[in-house]
Every structure is written in structure tokens, then in C-alpha cells.
Amino acid sequence: MKRVLTRKQKKRIGIALSAGLLLSLLAAAGTVGYLTFLRPAANPPAEACADGRPQARGPVVVAAGASVTKGTLGRNWIGDLRRREDLRGYEFVNAGHNGDTSADLRRRVDSDITACDPDLVTILIGTNDVRGGVPAEEYRANLAAIVDRVLEKTTARVALMSLPPLGEDLEAGVNHRLRDYNAAIKETANRARVDYVPVNERFTDRLRSRDRGPTYDFGFTTACLAAARHYLFGNSWDEVARGNGLELFVDHIHLSDRGGAILSDLTARWLPSARGTTGNRP
């Protein structure tokens, strides 16, 4: 005989199903939130340099920056460098922090860069300065202070990286503002006599070869949805980018696999050329 559920029983089942669904959604959101925003970068300074210079058999490289460098949202281009056969023996310390501005990096330059006594340092910082409306002159002063401190406290070879476009519409207002910050990067490199890596130029060349990209539209929701597609549904970062009508970015700021490849290839070309001119070790 078929059992007929009472209205109260149906209500209890409905509540249980709703609670289960809510818990599943919260667990999924927590997983994405941790993997994207809370987990530390691989081999961060707090671990790698807790006792000073890492015990590495090859050159120690500190990559300093914000979330694009940290690589938990978008392609982990530092991880790609670690896996390259031509860079075997290099020790990569990831000093990327989500949301950092030039002022934030300036405050942690000693703990996260000079404490590692590195041979080589890459600096990619400023996207959040542009987004946050930090005046270009203030940004220039912070960047100069960071470089000067690294040169004062170490004998590392330093490379300043120009900032990638924000989104793929090169005519967007935000990319017009970006030009002043990239000019400050190049001028700081020239003044301090450190190297300059043309990241923006390579991205721009790639984007100019295609139709105008979609309107710049970065936001927290866009970033979270991009992360969810990657971490929950297994989409590659390139697939996430295509889903948003993009090629080099997954959410208008963080890198697709193709975008990450541009950055890692530029860095890989710089590292061996700079290695022989560092002053720390033979």
C-alpha cells in the first residue's frame, strides 16, 4: 500500500532539502573563496625566507606584486616558470598579495623582498593603484622607494614590469589613465638603471591584432564567477576567458592561460640574461 505523506511531513522534507542545498552552496562558496582569496601563494616569503635566504642551489628569484602575481585567480605564471626545464635550479619566491597597491608593497618590501636576499627581483604592481584612483605621482614615489630599498639592501638585479591593459578594450578610459602609470614605470627603471620588461606592450600588440574587446567590466562578482567556473566546474582559464568574450583575461584583470604565457615567456627570457650580472653570488 502506497504511503501518503502528511502536509507536516512534506514540509519537513522540504526544509531538509532546502537546508541541504544551502549547505552545499555554502560549502562550494567557501571552497572557491579559500582557493581564490585566502590560500597563500606557493612558496611565499613567510615560508621561503623565514630564516633568511632560501637554501637554493641556483638563483633566488622574488616575484613581487598583487593578485596577478599571486596566481590563485587566473593563470599561475610563477608556477609555469618553476616547471620550465630551462629554469631548472631557480628558486621562485611568490611575493604576490591579493589587492595590494604600490603603498602596500612599499610597506612589506623588507619582509617580503630584501629578507630573502634575492639574486633577481621582478616587480609588477600598480593595477590596484589605477583602479583605486591613486594619483600617478604618488604611485611613482612608492615605486621609486621600493626599487631604491631593494637596491640599497641587496645586490639583486631588478626588473620593473609594465602593467597589462585593464580589460581588452584598449580605448576604454581606464586604459587611457593606465598610460601615466606605465610611463612612471619606464621612467623609474631608467632613473634607477634597472631593467624594464614590456608586458603592456606585448599584451597591446596581441589585442590590436583582433577586434575591439568587450567593455571593461571588472567586479567582485565577475571574479568570483570566473573562479567558480575554474575550481568547481574544471574549466581551463582560457575557457573561462572565452565565456566572458575575452582572450587574455578571465575577468578583465586576471590572466587566462594565454595571458599567463605572455608574462612567463617574457620573464623567462629576462632571467638568464640577468643572471650573469647579479652581484650576490657567482
Image: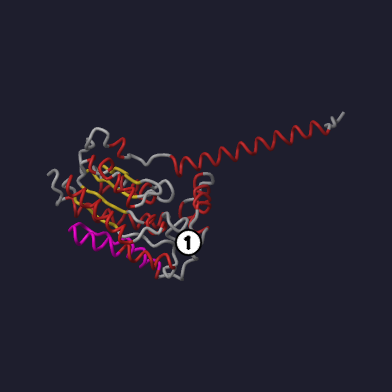
Identify which residue, 137 or 22, lies in the foreground.
137
- Reply yes or no: does residue 119 show up in magenta: no
Identify which residue, 135 or 35, lies in the foreground.
135
Q: How is the image coloured?
A: secondary structure
Main SS of the magenta segment? helix
Q: Which residues are magenta?
A: 183-207
* Residue 35 position (above or below residue 6): below
Is residue 82 toward the left or the right of residue 169 in the image? Answer: left
Q: Looking at the rendering, in which quadrant would you find the C terminus?
A: top left
Residue 9 % position (x, y): 79, 31
Q: Looking at the rendering, in which quadrant would you find the N terminus?
A: top right
Identity of the residue drawn at 20% across and 52% down: 148
Is residue 242 toward the left or the right of residue 55 in the image? Answer: right
* Residue 202 position (above or below residue 5): below
Residue 20 % position (x, y): 65, 35
Which structural element holds mark 1?
Answer: loop
Residue 130 % position (x, y): 38, 59
Residue 227 % position (x, y): 49, 48
The residue indicated by pointer 1 is 246
Residue farthest toward the right in the current orientation of the protein: 1
Identity of the residue drawn at 40% across and 70% down: 209
Identity of the residue drawn at 47% across and 56% down: 251
- Reply yes or no: does residue 192 show up in magenta: yes
Amino acid on which disc 1 is placed: Leu
Count of numbered circles in the view: 1
**Label 1: how many Cα within 10 Å (few below 14, some 14–19, many 20+):** many
Can you tell which quarter of the image residue 58 is in? Answer: top left
Identity of the residue drawn at 31% across and 48% down: 105
